Image: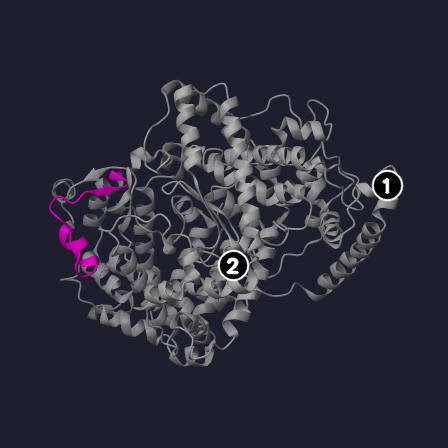
Amino acid sequence: MTSLKFDTDNDASNSGPPPRRSKMLKTLFIGAIVVFVFITVGFGYWVFPTHNEHSVCNTKECRDTASVVLSKINPQINPCDNFYEFTCGTYVDNMIIPEDKTNIDTFTEIGDKVEEQLKDILTAEPPQSTPKHFRQPNMLYKACMNTTRIESLGSIPITIIANFMGGWPLIVGDKWDGDNWTWQDQIKKFHRGGFNMNYIIEFSIKVDLQNTTKRMMTLDVSNLFLSREYLVKGFNETLVSAYYDYMVDIAVLFGAKKDEAKKQLLQSLEFEITLANISWSIENSHNYSELYNLRTPQQLKGEYPYVDWVDYMNALLPEGLSVQDDEIINLIEPPFFDQLGKLLANTPNRVIANYLMWRIHEFSLSYLSEEFHTRKQKYIMILAGHQEQRARWKECVYRVSKILSKSVASMYVPKHFDENSKSSVLQMVTNIRNVFNEILDEVNWMDDMTRLEAKNKLHKMATYIGYPDEILDNEKLTKYYEKLQIDPNNYFKSYLAFNKFQTNYIFNKLRLPVNKTDLADHAKTTDVGASYSAEGNSIYIPAGILQGDLYKANRPKYMNFGAIGYIIGHEISHGFDVRGRQFDEEGNLRDWWQPDTQKAYLKKAQCIIAQYGNYTESKTGLKLNGINTQSENIADNVGIKMAYRAYQRWVEKHGAEQRLPGLDYTPQQMFWISVAQTWCTKDRKEYLDYVITTDGHSPSKFRVLGPLSNSKEFSKDFQCPEDSPMNPVHKCEVW
């Protein structure tokens, strides 16, 4: 699972109330519903006298859970016609998306809670005697909130740096010296200054896909500003035109003449569009073997002579590291590099320089005075659809928790994480993993040799829950952050310092053996989202997600299995989806599938591709991309199947659970309701457009309708007639 953000540096921007009258009417209406829910829940076991009093759970946790379920459900809808409308109809009708948000759902609601918790942590003044890593988040938060200081500096922080780097040609004019300028030298200066160095070519240190015990240098395609899927459409695409207007307006704010800005930045945007066109689409990026192309420095020189590769990479490596003569470098997309040389040769230096300088100026906007920040937010609103900027404190909480994630996590966990959750959720993981082991035994399209490999991979899959123990080790954290300096009086400078610190930390691990439990890789503790790592063959369920409507220790197990249990199953199954299946038990890229089994798998996956590719999202009129979303869709389908069966196993061992008050549904039916209500969502049209165009996940309602219409167990529990909308005759099943 991933969490979409809409800022250009993966930021999300959300804030502000809806129109007053509309909000008041909605509030009154919702209030009436709450009163009804309270009455219904309070007397629920009298409303349905057919059930024994002892079959109803009437604890506070059960009453609260029932209230939440009832507030979302629309009982007027037949669950066999549209289960999403049945479980989420009232929620979608009555919820108001805050003006600063792109959407609202279970995850954003938990995120809001985490945000408030982090605010309390960051605004508390730590004693001077506490370790530096406890004080730095507070210092950076203060620097971010010090708008008086930020306003007084205006654009000075980036202007000084840009001029030192040769200046922005568009603004410098005829004074710009292009005779001795090269894009390689410009990127080197960016790197030394703490900026992104991947605007033309991405150079990074990553795990060797075929030997995940070591790392290697990697060369990849450009980091584009706007998603490739939009850029390749050119200026006929609304978001590309909005991007161009944004470029021009920002240049003018920095002192450029508008006519010149329009002329020169048009050329720079055309350059970026060409970069997008020569890179692969998402559809072409599913086969990792095609993304693993090893070269030596000498081979790079022979194939792509337009760059002095050794000099370029050495300049980007930290002191003490250098490219060896026998260095093995992974070239992600050779066709991109084939065409890049021609593009660079045919593009004037001034055009490339304007593009590069635009990128670092745009990067700086969030750290400058309000006029720059406001124009950036205006563009993001067009992209994502929200109506207002989020409050400054939210912006600062987000950035500090992103930059100093380990320090922030070390303070968050003792205050807000229930340690008992770790063992409880780990047991759920074990139960769900055991179910997938059963499923591997049952599938009739898999040969015995491949089945044995799959079982071995499942057995060796690592699980990380809550947080890594290292974040509570002051000595380790102090050592980790010892070279990072935060300037409480200079927000922008502090951010650049962090970028340099982080890049050097990652690059300095080049010659070191890979530690798959590394603090840096498993410390996103406050994230409200789980993940699977193919290279680590591991799942991570962070503390941030283990709360709210996704997990509560004392509510019925059918609610937890339907929510966090489904998410766990989803992540486990990523190890066996169209991408994850290409990696073995050690996380190495290796083809362990027998040809006939692989062919059978791909045929079954094609059913999922076709099913989801036939869905049309009504608000946007866009069809889903079944190819781009196949991995997540397969994970949803089998993840739910795993969680359901794991719950059935739990019932066999512990006995049937009580019903919820006011809800005349069996525990099995409540499992499905819990699954669906995990995805109750209200989205802005622009957000849906962005998700469908760029994201690997299907929109929320299809994450309910797709898997449940494929589930025989669902149709049985709700007694859906054959060939009803939720029980079609033709079903897709990979696992």
As drawn, 666 above or below 173? above
Going by the numbered disc 2, the residue's amino acid type is Met
Frontmost residue, 233 versus 165: 165
Q: What percent of the width, then of the height, locates residue 494?
A: 35, 71
Q: Residue at x 51, y 46 (%)?
A: 691
Frontmost residue, 286 versus 616: 286
Number of numbered discs overlaid on the protein picture: 2
Q: Which secondary structure, mark 2?
A: helix
Going by the numbered disc 1, the residue's amino acid type is Phe
Residue ranking furthest to the front: 653
Q: What percent of the width, then of the height, locates residue 723?
A: 68, 23
Q: Which secondary structure, mark 1?
A: loop
**Quadrant in the picture for residue 418:** bottom right
The answer to whether 594 appears left or right of 719 in the picture is left
State the mark number for residue 48: 1
Q: What percent of the width, then of the height, locates residue 571?
A: 49, 41
State the mark number for residue 381: 2
Q: Residue at x 30, y 34 (%)?
A: 290
Image: magenta residue range? 310-335
The answer to whether 227 appears left or right of 98 in the picture is left
Q: Is residue 330 magenta?
A: yes
Q: CA distance from mark 2 to mark 1?
A: 48 Å
Q: Residue at x 38, y 73 (%)?
A: 132
Is residue 227 at least partly visible in the picture? yes
Q: What percent of the width, then of the height, locates residue 533?
A: 41, 43
The answer to whether 30 appears left or right of 486 in the picture is right
- Discs 2/1, front: 1
Q: Is residue 114 magenta?
A: no
Q: Residue at x 80, y 52 (%)?
A: 37
The figure's colour scheme reads one colour
